Image: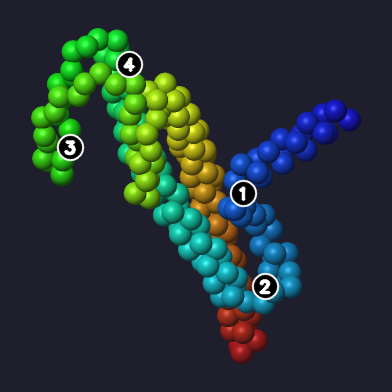
Amino acid sequence: MATTIDSCNAVQATKKKHLGIPEAIFVEDVESFMKQPGNDTADAVLRKLDEQYQKYKYMELNLAQKKQRLKSQIPQIKQTLEILRHMQKKKETTDPMETHFLLADNVYCKASVPPTDKVCLWLGANVMLEYDIDEAQSLLEKNLATASRNLDSLEEDLDFLRDQFTTTEVNMARVYNWDVKRRSKDNLLKSVEKS
């Protein structure tokens, strides 16, 4: 009983992991699959499978864009955390910190920053908030952990999506080959009837 519940939970966890991505079902027996309602002709089935394949391609494009965004975001968060740690060390001293900051693309300006316990962080959507260095550090560490977790989840979703591509492509090939065999058999029967 416990094993059944555990296996059901594992199946549910897998389905939840890839929520939003429909699973492609492998067509084991093409003959019985083609007799199901809605599968009138091989062309109609191939169109459905191609439509499903195109949806998977679209999902892959979106996931790849999210992955790229996260891959660029993670190093930025790490760099900002590094700067905050450096500022944490410098806030105990009275010496100003000499640095360069980005003014525009590839344009930097030299600055002298007095010791401080406050920093401003860009949160996105043209929003900047002032934080204590400790609060900013904990926020960025939380954001880094979330971004890393999201990247891992995206990797898993992309792997799952690649499996769906393969299954759909194999199904398309199997249905197409079934149709070719059926047509050649029909043509053979017609030629035998004529002779």
Q: Nearer the viewer, mark 4 or mark 1?
A: 4
Q: CA distance from mark 4 to mark 1?
A: 42 Å
Of the image marks 4 and 1, the number of the one nearer the N terminus:
1
The amino acid marked with disc number 3 is Leu
- Residue 134, quarter of the rendered image: top left
Q: CA distance from mark 2 to mark 4?
A: 67 Å
Quarter in which the N terminus is drawn: top right
Residue 28 position in % (x across, y down): 67, 54
* Callouts 3 and 2 close, C-beta under 8 Å: no
The residue singled out by tag 2 in the image is 39
Of the image marks 3 and 4, the number of the one nearer the N terminus:
4
The residue singled out by tag 4 in the image is 88
Image height of 135 relative to 164, above or below: above
Of the image marks 2 and 1, the number of the one nearer the N terminus:
1
Visual colour scheme? rainbow
The amino acid marked with disc number 2 is Asn
The residue singled out by tag 3 in the image is 102
Crowding around mark 2 (Cα neighbors within 10 Å: few <14, some 14 to 19, many 20+) is some
Crowding around mark 3 (Cα neighbors within 10 Å: few <14, some 14 to 19, many 20+) is few
| Along the viewing direction, whichever of 85 and 70 lies nearer the viewer | 85
Residue found farthest to the bottom: 194
Quarter in which the C terminus is drawn: bottom right
Q: Residue at x 66, y 45 (%)?
A: 15
73 vs 52, left or right, is left
Residue 173: tell me if it is visible.
no
